[in-house]
């Protein structure tokens, strides 16, 4: 197995652990830095642009230009990413951390479906088992979501909308990674999403300048540079099905953060759901059995 491929699966798992801290850091950006949720999304992208632009320039030297249609697709993907962050960050402040991450990763199943559409075939037995375990685990992780207050329900709906936008972003990145290196893809998408977030934050009347830069910088470094950086890298080596199911590790990690920081208690069903999702990740990594080719005379 190539070294890049063997590192891709740990990379996408590590990416999701860093991304899972996003909801907590968004809350800190509001409570400690005094900025709005959409403004937090703007700074998440804006602070990462100089580093991403430099690394992308270094990685692009000596490479052929991918073509403007691909670059335009990444720009459109960045706009969807901005819409995802705006909806998700608003939802984070209106529901539990675990719910915001879980519903925001509604893209997990949509992106997996996209993967099977690319393959033009139905999932095999092992893949079907992994999807079933992931679905049951996700249902258990929902816990008492159906009995939330109207305010929390609004947060859940915003997170689901964010998951839809995130799916379109992931599809654009997946297409671009076939012909582009990871850092140029992330740099273009990040730059494309920053300006719309700033305009939207100002239109909503949010405070944009942070009073404390610590949570804002932590959000940009952990979620955009490390989390998205590892994710975009892994997407060049793993199928959308594997990447999609790996997103479901975020609600597990985010639920743990919510338990420790905000005393958002987990039930036994939450624990069982987390274990089922972990089992699904093991199954999806098992090699697919293929029927041996028949001799030419047969």
Image (cartoon, helix red, strand yellow):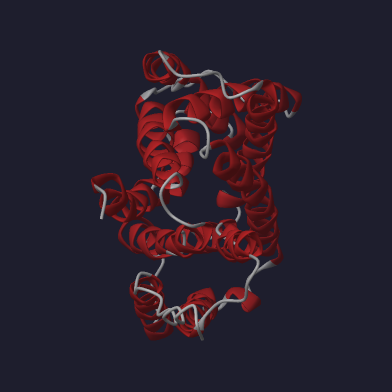
Image height of 65 relative to 128, above or below = above
Q: Residue at x 45, y 16 (%)?
A: 53
89 vs 27, nearest the viewer: 89
Position in image of residue 199 (x %, y %): 71, 21
The quadrant of the rendering that contains the N terminus is bottom left
283 vs 154, nearest the viewer: 283
Q: Residue at x 55, y 44 (%)?
A: 174
Mark yes or no: residue 34 visible: no
* Horizontal side, residue 146 vs residue 278: left or right: right
Position in image of residue 260 (x %, y %): 30, 60
Mark yes or no: residue 297 visible: yes
Q: Residue at x 44, y 23 (%)?
A: 48
Position in image of residue 240 (x %, y %): 52, 57
* Horizontal side, residue 125 vs residue 189: left or right: left
> To which quarter of the image does residue 10 belong?
bottom left
- Residue most toward the right? 203
217 vs 111, nearest the viewer: 111
* Horizontal side, residue 210 vs residue 8: left or right: right
Q: Residue at x 38, y 71 (%)?
A: 281
- Residue most toward the front? 297
Position in image of residue 155 (x %, y %): 65, 56
Q: How many marks?
A: 0
Image height of 44 relative to 59, above or below = below
């Amino acid at each position: 197995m190539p070294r890049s491929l063997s590192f891709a699966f740990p990379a996408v798992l590590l990416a999701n652990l860093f991304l899972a801290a996003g909801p907590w850091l968004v809350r800190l950006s509001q409570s400690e830095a005094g900025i709005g949720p959409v403004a937090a999304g703007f700074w998440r992208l804006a602070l990462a642009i100089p580093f991403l632009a430099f690394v992308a320039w270094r990685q692009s030297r000596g490479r052929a230009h991918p073509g403007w249609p691909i670059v335009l697709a990444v720009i459109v993907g960045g706009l969807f990413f901005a819409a995802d962050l705006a909806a998700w960050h608003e939802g984070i402040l209106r529901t539990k951390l675990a719910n915001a991450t879980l519903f925001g990763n509604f893209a997990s199943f949509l992106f997996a479906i996209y993967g099977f559409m690319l393959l033009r075939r139905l999932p095999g037995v092992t893949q079907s088992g992994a999807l079933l375990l992931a679905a049951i685990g996700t249902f258990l992780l929902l816990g008492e979501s159906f009995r939330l207050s109207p305010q929390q329900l609004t947060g859940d709906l915003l997170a689901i909308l964010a998951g839809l936008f995130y799916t379109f972003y992931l599809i654009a990145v997946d297409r671009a990674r076939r012909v582009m290196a990871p850092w140029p893809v992330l740099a273009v998408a990040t730059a494309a999403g920053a300006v719309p977030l700033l305009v939207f934050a100002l239109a909503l009347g949010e405070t944009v300048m942070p009073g404390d830069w610590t949570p804002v910088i932590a959000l940009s470094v952990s979620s955009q540079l490390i989390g998205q950086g590892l994710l975009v890298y892994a997407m060049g080596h793993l199928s959308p099905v594997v990447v999609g199911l790996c997103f479901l590790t975020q609600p597990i990690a985010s639920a743990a953060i919510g338990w420790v920081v905000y005393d958002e208690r987990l039930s036994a069903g939450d624990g069982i759901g987390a274990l089922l999702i972990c089992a699904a990740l093991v199954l999806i990594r098992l090699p697919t059995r293929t029927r041996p080719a028949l001799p030419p005379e047969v």
